[in-house]
Image (tube, rainbow, N blue to C red):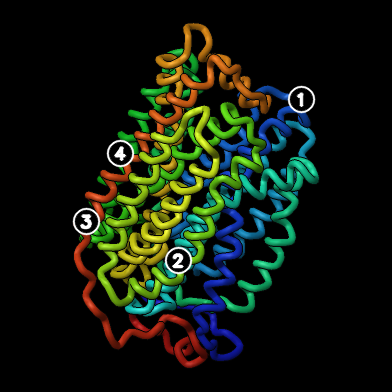
Amino acid sequence: MTTRTAAPARNQEVRPWPALWSLVLGFFMILIDTTIVSVANPAILRGLDTDINSVIWVTSAYLLAYAVPLLVTGRLGDRFGPKNLYLIGLVVFTAASAACGLAGSIEVLIAARVVQGLGAAMMTPQTMAVITRIFPPDRRGAAMGLWGATAGVATLVGPILGGLLVDGFGWEWIFFINVPVGILAFVLVMRNVPRLATGSHRFDILGVVLSAIGMFLLVFGIQEGEAYDWGQIVGPISVWSLIIAGVVVLAAFVVWQKIGRGEPLLPLGLFRDRNFSLANAGITMVGFAITSMSLPLVFYFQTVRGLTPTQSALMLVPMAVISAGLAPVVGKIIDKVNPRNLAVVGMVLLAVALTWYSMLLKPDTELWMLLFPSAVLGLANAGIWAPISNTATRNLPPMSAGAGSGVYNTTRQIGAVLGSASIAVLIESRLAAELPAGESGGSGAAEIGGGVLPDFLQAGFATAMGQALLLPAGVALVGAVIVAFFAKPTPRGGWAPAEVPSEKSAEAPAAH
């Protein structure tokens, strides 16, 4: 394989931090869109005169289209350049956002959300790939601190921003807001992100087909299992048959990556690195826990305590503020200490915070007391994202940065889908156990309508939500055990971003 690129007009000066800030703006936008719609669901339901199952697909379609192509788009970044793929994805995402806001029917909105998800899938792996290629390993921790703060804070800002926009301007503006942000991000990326050398990869067409089909079957089966009561979808096709088929196809994909004669879509050699493998397992646990914790909390705040969507999101502000404030500090520390220690503490604190919440979820708990576990979540967030991300990417070879980033973000999304599906099943089970017979089915309707449960149901409902939070708490502890086996990173010296092209290097491509 050779390194190639078109010759730029002049030598490019690599400015890592302006490049990273430019990329993070778009990354923040696409992560917000994974959560912002949940607050707007009732308004969308009324505005488009549709039903709740269709409205749920507004989020499901985005997550599905986001998760499925990540392996492919990560490799495309290696082939055609991370900057190029990011810009294409940004244009697709921004245009689709405008289409979402202009949608006059639920069908058009769902279709536009699919296109949005595809744009997000093109963008996400490129952020980590660029970090890996323009920051030296021993200074990559601070960069991953910013990336981690973005990922952690975006999960909270989405509901807050969504509530403010829906209450103030209407549901369409949760999508229209992306248009000026996308335009600004495009200008900044064009100006600040360097063109990085690409490799003359042979694209693995069979690998693309197998990975896409396998991911679709697996993610769709998990994501929609609860909607079909984990039974039949149509005719002989059941939820479990889709999940099993997805696993089988993905297994065939892995076998093909091993025995195929061409260049693999997924270099299995990446998994020989112990830290890369463990980091992928760890971020799957993080995706599961962070995604699954939000539903019981939102249900409790709105259905038991009668808070508005914006007020319920504001209950998590301590988490957002502490996480954002500490993330840069953690990033600097990572370059000096073993990131394993920070990751273990972060995962344990996540479990502690969720268990604390579980104990406090009662109808008569003072609201101010619920701010304390939110603050602990902020400490946990700061110690989780950057150390695990930095550990995953530290030893990646530059020309496999996109592939590795694609794998990492895919496992994170799969964890999120698993968490979403699992918590829905557990909530239904605990409501059936804690509420009087025949009453559990009414909770969803009350929440969707923004109403509060009758007094005689509130204690049982709150107890069920508290019990449900023990699931992500347990998963966080499993994650703590996984990251405890990280190997201590070895110092590296003499690194330089040599793959950034210049006129001289473009004239004589170097062997790679």
Q: Position of residue 115 (x, y in %)?
A: 62, 46
Residue depth check, mark 4 versus mark 2: number of the one nearer the observer: 2
Label 4 CA crowd tier, 10 Å (few <14, some 14–19, many 20+):
some
Residue 66 disc label: none
Q: Which is more toward the observer, 177 or 120?
A: 177
What whole-number distance in Å separates the C-alpha atoms at marks 4 and 2?
A: 25 Å
Badge 1 element? loop
The amino acid at mark 3 is Ala
Tell which circle, 4 or 3, labels the residue nearer the N-terminal end: 4
User: Is 479 on the left-hand or right-hand side of 457?
Assistant: left
Tell which circle, 4 or 2, labels the residue nearer the N-terminal end: 2
| Quadrant of the rendered image containing residue 225 | top left
| Quadrant of the rendered image containing residue 508 | bottom left
Label 2 CA crowd tier, 10 Å (few <14, some 14–19, many 20+):
some
Badge 3 element? loop
Tell which circle, 1 or 4, labels the residue nearer the N-terminal end: 1
Q: Position of residue 481 (x, y in %)?
A: 22, 49
Badge 4 element? helix
Residue 326 disc label: 2
Q: Are marks 1 and 3 in contact (CB under 8 Å)?
A: no
Tell which circle, 1 or 3, labels the residue nearer the N-terminal end: 1
The amino acid at mark 2 is Leu
Q: Position of residue 434 (x, y in %)?
A: 43, 16
The amino acid at mark 1 is Asp
What whole-number distance in Å separates the C-alpha atoms at marks 4 and 3?
A: 16 Å
Which residue in the protein does label 4 denote? 474
User: Is 378 on the left-hand or right-hand side of 192?
Assistant: left
Badge 2 element? helix
Residue 49 disc label: 1
Which residue in the protein does label 3 denote? 484
